[in-house]
Amino acid sequence: MESVFKFLKDAGTYFLATDDDGQPRVRPFGTVNVFDGKLYIQTGKKKNVSKQLHKNPKAEICAFKDDKTLRITCELIEDPRTEAKKSILDAYPYLRGMYDENDGNTEVFYMKNATAVFSSFTEPPKEIKF
């Protein structure tokens, strides 16, 4: 899981795909954090991505860096704990202008049943499950 975290962090931007009643929706994200032994992302409850994940937690994440691709298939499960929200906001202090762990809008999700595949055109794929 650490190599997945490092890749996402180093890439800076990754793309999250969710389901919107059968229509895939993809958007850029940039938050990723390890907390309590799990890999987390952050969003706001007011956003469509939050509504989509609550309806169907299955998601895919894709990132690209230095001619390598990372693709993660997982479920994104909400963690309502204030400590989890604070942890990711502390890792991204610039978000505190828009979010706070106690604002009723900040939401964090951890990856469950995740399969990450690192690939490139020059190396065989490497799969990690967490």
Image (cartoon, rainbow, N blue to C red):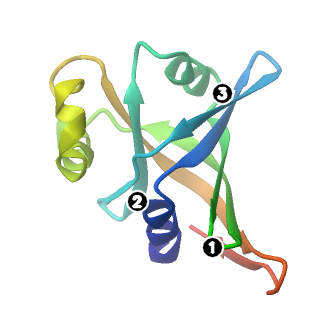
Q: Residue furthest bottom?
A: 123
Q: Can you identify the residue that label 2 sits on?
A: 38
Q: What residue type is labelled 3?
A: Asn
Q: Nearer the viewer, residue 126 or 64?
A: 64
Q: Is residue 55 visible?
A: yes
Distance from the alpha carbon under mark 1 to that under mark 2:
25 Å
Q: Contact (CB < 8 A) between labels 3 and 2?
A: no
Q: Can you identify the residue that label 3 sits on?
A: 56
Q: What residue type is labelled 1?
A: Asp
Q: Can you identify the residue that label 1 sits on?
A: 66
Q: Which amino acid does label 2 sit on?
A: Lys
| Position in image of residue 70 (x %, y %) | 66, 64
| Position in image of residue 112 (x %, y %) | 55, 52
Q: What element carries label 1?
A: loop
Q: Which of marks 3 and 1 is in front?
A: 1
Q: Is residue 100 visible?
A: no
Q: Which residue is drawn at 62% across and 58% down?
A: 114
| Position in image of residue 4 (x %, y %) | 53, 69
Q: Which of 75 and 72 is in front in this view?
A: 72
Relative vertical location of residue 93 with respect to residue 37 in this rendering, above or below: above
Q: Is mark 2 on a helix, strand or loop?
A: strand
Relative vertical location of residue 8 with respect to residue 24 in this rendering, above or below: below
Does label 1 or label 2 sit earlier along the sequence?
2
